[in-house]
Amino acid sequence: MDYMADRTEEMTGIEATNTNRVRNLASECAVLLENDGTLPLPASSNIALYGSGARHTIKGGTGSGDVNSRHEVSIEEGLEAQGVTITTKAWLDRYDERKDKHFKEFTAKVEKYAADSGVALSNAYFKFPYVLPDPVEVTEEDIKISDTDIAIFVISRNSGEGADRKNEEGDYKLSKAEITILDTLRKAYGKLIVLLNVGGVIDTTYLKSMGLNSLMIISQTGAVTGHVAADLITGRAVPSGKLSTTWAGEYDKYPTSEIFNTDRHEEFYLEGLYVGYRYFDSYGIVPDYPFGYGKSYTTFDVETVDVICEGSRIKAIVNVTNTGKYPGKEVVQIYCSAPETEIDRPYQELICFEKTGLIMPGEGEQMTLFFKASDLACYDEETFSNVIKAGAYILRIGTSSRDTRIEAVINIPTDVKVRVMRDILQDDRTLDIETILNPGYGKQANDLKDANELLLARQIEVDPRYIRCEKILYNGVRDTYENYREIDTVTLTDVMAHSAGMIELVGDMSDKELATLCVGSFERDGIDENAVWAASMNVPGAAAESTDRFKVMRKIPPMVLADGPAGLRLQPHFKTTKDGELLPGGEVFNLAKTPFPEDTPEDAIDYYQYCTAIPIATAIAQSWNTKLAWAFGDIVGSECEKFGVNLWLAPGMNIHRDPLCGRNFEYFSEDPLLTGKIAAGETKGVQAHSGVAVTIKHFCCNNRETNRMFNNSHVTVRTLREIYLKGFEICVDEAKPLACMMSYNLLNGVHTAASYELIQNVLRDEFGFEGVVMTDWYSSFPVDEMKVLGEGEDSIYPEAVSHLCVYAGCDWQMPGCQDNIDDIVHSVAQGRLSRGDLQNCALNIIRFILKVME
């Protein structure tokens, strides 16, 4: 077998280039929350460095989103590389001793759990993401020998796939040890800087009350997080990030705090539309740090020059001037407040944004921002349509959700429908749900300010005749195809040579062939523990391959699928025989590492696949820069192309509904517009490479990890359309992703992978998606076979049944098992599934393969 991996362990040119690109780009992902001028520091500074993440900096979360990097740069290493002197080596060494002991105890605990429960070790680590122990005490001697007036304290948090976070000390809350050390450092040092090396929101109430000199979210920006942090601290780079999620402070402030994860089997989205800033702004609740907020080392003046209607789109022209002493970038954000009608609306919603380039002190940039008049619409549950209600729409332009000025009023003279749809996605149990409504507190709090600004606001008239109404045509009964060509065995080569069409190819295939094509790839009985999440033969460590059963007979090549979203997760080192046979050993997943056996042949050939860890998705969204997202996608795409990966299982696009979701670090934002735009940028960057595509996921409402394969999300149709589906629609429309992965959960009583309304009606008919759709891993496996994953033991719901997935239009069932094939074949034979439905899935797979091979 020919492998595309490197034969040398030395860092290659593409790895070095991509590592440097991440370092130079990722500073835009940091969010400066507080700064009194202390930052940046001179590179020649002496610094007392403390905290769990100082030497053990976290590059990203755990699970399938992890990346096996060559080397991870800590903040200590990054600062020293800049010339900073760290004066607290003794404290850091003492913490190492605690950490080493803690880690040994942790691994022993997880290994025992895996052995006792029969769960694969890799999945046991899913349930127990490693959390760094509390920092050791800072003594008077530590302070004395540090011999500096500047202290940096690093707070780190880890989370991962398979487990949700908790509103407890050391997780969402600061631990008692952290608070004690912060108090000690505040008294002992003249300057105290706190760095948040976190993947999600934590409680900043205490930090905000301390009067810190500087507070910055450095986030988790991949293997070079330490370099990125050091660049920001010393001024080699400047922070320009903005929060992509509201940091409220105490967890009880969030609208979901009393309902999230309270029932193992059911999750009711009672907050409705009021997620994140939509809730805080409508209810007049002041968060610690609002959505869209972020400081800079410099200051900016933002002036709206004009707002103009051009047919069916609105154009805003804005001047941004750097009025400070440092270079920097600013984000212009436009929010819209809808008129009060019979349809409830939040106080304001993000409708457009754009980031400047780097502006030098005293210089400026003129920006032109566009959005469509149809973006003002909301979903009308009475008419099943998106409609712009008549009235005055207030445009607020500024630099965060809480720092805007009214610049224009868009007047719509009459109700305008912009899309007419079917009554779908309903759940009998959601019909009786009373979701919260806008009480008007946010509007009342701003009435005086708004009244003064409205006097000077531009009045924009929109002619409804320019606004197009789209009437969705929904799919009917799927056709059944036959082979009418005089070809004994139609192959993909025949299709590519135009000797036959795709419909002749699927028409020529038997039911069993079609089912096999649609059921991933499996070459084993049951599930091998070391291959649960790494089952590729061509690219070791990749998550899966599609079947190779038709490589000879039908000339259909297998596709290689690799995990994301923080880069490519591949096996960094593997060995083969001289004949290319893959040898055991070298597998890495989470903290489960398999050594090479002692009987490995001496003449075995070594291969290497070191990949670049890019920032976590939340960090990329904090840049508010679609061009930056494209650049990170380009990095991933270049490595997919290099190592032979066809399909990157990312980006993750689920909404930050609640800060305790364990996989929030894999997702972008609480806002669907920001989510969709950043995902589209990343998608374009990846798919710019030959033979490579993305997989947008998890469609949809994968907003908790507890009982993730069998929890049932109950969501109103309007909430779905305006919050949880909208980001996917934006990405599909703007970037044309070639694949989509369904979520594990049920949605309104139906597994998403088996939902015809969600896949066929919404994704394909309404959004115009033309790619391939797949299950998340093991969604359609029989419940009894999921025990090795630690799932399904007490489920009150069945798995996503295979033939129902096919009917729904879920083309690939990953990674597949014989039960899946048998169920599909038998269902066709018994008339429970049409052959046309099965051929439809096969056609989508073949179309995808042809697009990738272009």
Image (spheres, helix red, strand yellow):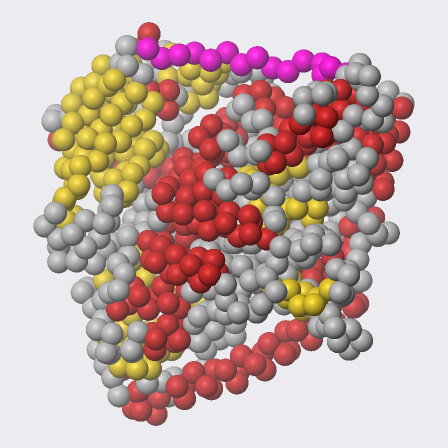
Residue 432, position as x, y percentages in the image: 58, 27
Residue 842, by quadrant, is top right
Residue 403, position as x, y percentages in the image: 23, 42
Residue extent of the magenta highlight:
466-480
Give the side of residue 210 with respect to residue 824, left or right: left
Residue visible at 27% across and 73% down in the picture:
192
Residue visible at 66% across and 55% down in the picture:
3
Q: Quadrant of the N terminus?
A: bottom right
Q: Main secondary structure of the magenta part?
A: loop
Q: Quadrant of the C terminus?
A: top right
Residue 658 visible in image: no
Residue visible at 52% across and 74% down in the picture:
133
Answer above or below: position of 115 versus 92: above
Residue 790, by quadrant, is bottom right
Residue 27, position as x, y percentages in the image: 33, 58
Answer above or below: position of 5 versus 591: above
Residue 333, position as x, y percentages in the image: 28, 38
Report the front residue among 1 and 518: 1
Residue 318 visible in image: yes
Q: Is residue 540 magenta?
A: no
Give the side of residue 343 with respect to residue 544, left or right: left
Report the front residue among 639 and 143: 639
Residue visible at 18% across and 65% down in the picture:
37
